[in-house]
Image: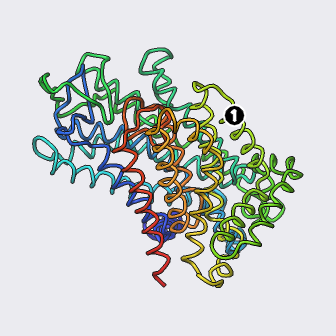
């Protein structure tokens, strides 16, 4: 079987994906996130809480809780990590060679899907190994490997199949190869989460749980069937230490639930059917290396309509030309970002006026919109040299790669201050901790944007993690460490200091990596 062309191509896909630095960065991010979400019960929070009491950290509890949280993370980040292979083939010129081979469209699409699934499964394996390590340090009872394998396979494999299928579909059809596909999947992901919650609450037909590829509804159903309560929480949840802990049974999954998860896994392959039919096969009349993404991106279309606004960035670039040293370079980088994305100039004007004039109760909403726009903008700006093919040129100027990294980090931070600075100024007299949290969060996010862009050379790693983190942030209330930019007003000096330290650590890591050569 290993000599069949399908498996040879799939194995090559896995190897190519694992060679990317984004894969290493993703593994490190998975380890960090897993370690953070399985909190030590001595801190007063637990991964699973039922009726105000914590659930003992047995194998079944840790497997279920980690799989639910991992499903939420990987169902978004997995799509962005699985994408990009077609774009690499187009940029390298190998796409024309692939299109000229006698291999059929179905074979090429299936091999891409198997390669994406293989890479995601390896990441899920790292996720489970980290969970097992947390069990050895914080768990209660023996490590039951079969319990972990069953729970993670039933909850996470259908999700991995669906992410890979959607990624292959977007890479196979030219209109979805750029930001349009990224944004469309993000909307689809939010709909899936809403569907899982609706099924779990009984608001829609239970058969729609087959489309809950994240496994949220099935996991909550299994938990409720054994606990007989609806008062439960998953994540870093506070609990009442005076109440005795609950203990889940070893095996949570019934035959009916297993059958439904298998059906979800089969339905997750549905996007592959239109992918085969729409596959462009690298035909130059259907997809182009340099123009396919730009001409079909909704944001690029908006920038085209707002192109006259780019003239407003000219004074900034003239000022940058007069300033010597790194300061002028940072201003020039910001001017280039604004000139290439005129929609950012309009968004800056809205954020500035709104931050000064809107009532206080409307500032969190304005902050959320500004943060999302800034994150999407920075995911592109920190990898602009790579996508433009001038990475070697920018590395040859005085300062080389290290100064380029520092310039991109400082430009991202300056853009963040321009977008969200007015909100911080409004908060500083009345809520100084909240204003400090906003500034510390910007330092952390800017460091991650520059570091992930340098490691992965693609905007999707930071964009996927950023969008997931943003969704978690707006949903989590009352948890200081989840309030990265003071959105809910729950941030504390300790949490803000932690984000500031994380941002400086990301900055130091980027500087160290840029000096490797």
**Residue at numbered disc 1:** 354
In the rendered image, the residue lying farthest to the right is: 308
Q: Is residue 118 left or right of residue 370?
A: left
Residue at the image point whose x is 46% and y is 75% from the top: 513
- 121 displayed left or right of 398: left
- In the rendered image, is residue 107 in sight? no
Judge by depth and name the residue closer to the eye, 220 or 43. Answer: 43
In the rendered image, the vertical position of residue 315 relative to residue 261, given as above or below = below
Q: Residue at x 61, y 61 (%)?
A: 108
Residue 398's image quarter? bottom right
Residue found at the far front of this picture: 429
**Image location of residue 354, percent across then percent down:** 69, 34
Residue 222 sits in quarter: top left
Circle 1 packing at 10 Å, graded few (<14), some (14-19), many (20+), is some
**Could you tell me residue 139's position as x and y percent?**
15, 43
How does the figure colour the protein chain or chains?
Answer: rainbow
Residue 447, given in percent of the width and then of the height, sits at 50, 60
Where is residue 347 shown, x and y percent of the image? 73, 43
Along the line of sight, which residue is nearer the eye, 60 or 277?
A: 60
**Residue for point 78% across, 59% down:** 340
Q: Check disc 1 and report its element: helix, strand or loop.
A: helix
Numbered marks: total = 1
The residue at the point 31 percent across, 36 percent down is 236
Q: Is residue 460 visible?
A: yes
- Which quarter of the rendered picture does the N terminus lie within? bottom left
């Amino acid at each position: 079987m290993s000599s069949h062309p399908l498996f040879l191509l799939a194995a090559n896909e896995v190897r190519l994906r694992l060679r990317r630095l984004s894969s290493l960065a993703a593994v490190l991010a998975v380890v960090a996130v897993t370690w953070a979400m399985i909190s030590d019960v001595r801190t007063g929070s637990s991964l699973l809480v039922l009726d105000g009491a914590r659930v003992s950290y047995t194998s079944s509890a840790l497997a279920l809780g980690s799989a639910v949280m991992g499903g939420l993370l990987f169902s978004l980040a997995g799509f962005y990590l699985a994408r990009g292979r077609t774009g690499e083939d187009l940029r390298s010129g190998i796409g024309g060679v692939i299109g000229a081979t006698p291999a059929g469209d179905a074979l090429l699409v299936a091999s891409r899907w198997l390669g994406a699934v293989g890479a995601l499964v390896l990441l899920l394996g790292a996720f489970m190994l980290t969970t097992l390590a947390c069990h050895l340090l914080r768990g209660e009872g023996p490590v039951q490997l079969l319990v972990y394998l069953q729970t993670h396979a039933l909850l996470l494999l259908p999700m991995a199949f669906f992410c890979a299928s959607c990624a292959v579909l977007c890479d196979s059809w030219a209109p979805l190869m750029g930001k349009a596909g990224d944004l469309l999947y993000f909307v689809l992901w939010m709909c899936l989460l809403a569907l899982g919650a609706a099924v779990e609450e009984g608001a829609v037909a239970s058969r729609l749980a087959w489309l809950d590829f994240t496994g949220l509804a099935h996991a909550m159903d299994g938990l409720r069937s054994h606990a007989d309560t609806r008062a439960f929480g998953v994540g870093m949840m506070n609990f009442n230490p005076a109440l005795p802990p609950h203990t889940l049974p070893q095996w949570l999954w019934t035959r009916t639930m297993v059958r439904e998860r298998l059906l979800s896994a089969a339905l997750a392959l549905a996007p592959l059917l239109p992918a085969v039919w729409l596959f462009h096969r690298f035909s130059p009349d259907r997809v182009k290396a340099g123009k396919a993404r730009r001409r079909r991106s909704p944001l690029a279309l908006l920038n085209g309509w707002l192109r006259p606004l780019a003239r407003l960035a000219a004074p900034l670039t003239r000022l940058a030309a007069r300033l010597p040293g790194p300061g002028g370079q940072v201003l020039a980088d910001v001017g280039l970002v604004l000139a290439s994305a005129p929609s950012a100039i309009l968004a800056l004007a809205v954020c500035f006026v709104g931050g000064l004039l809107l009532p206080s109760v409307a500032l969190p909403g304005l902050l959320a919109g500004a943060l999302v726009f800034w994150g999407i903008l920075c995911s592109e700006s920190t990898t602009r040299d790579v996508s433009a093919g001038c990475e070697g040129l920018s590395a040859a100027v005085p300062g080389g790669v290290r100064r380029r990294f520092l310039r991109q980090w400082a430009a991202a931070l300056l853009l963040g201050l321009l977008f969200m600075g007015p909100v911080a100024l409004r908060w500083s007299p009345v809520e100084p901790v909240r204003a400090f949290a906003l500034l510390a969060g910007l330092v952390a996010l800017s460091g991650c944007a520059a570091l992930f862009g340098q490691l992965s050379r693609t905007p999707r790693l930071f964009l996927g993690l950023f969008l997931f983190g943003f969704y978690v942030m707006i949903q989590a209330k009352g948890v200081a460490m989840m309030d990265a930019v003071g959105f809910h007003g729950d941030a504390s000096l300790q949490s803000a200091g932690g984000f500031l330290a994380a941002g400086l650590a990301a900055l130091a890591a980027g500087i160290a990596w840029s000096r490797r050569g």
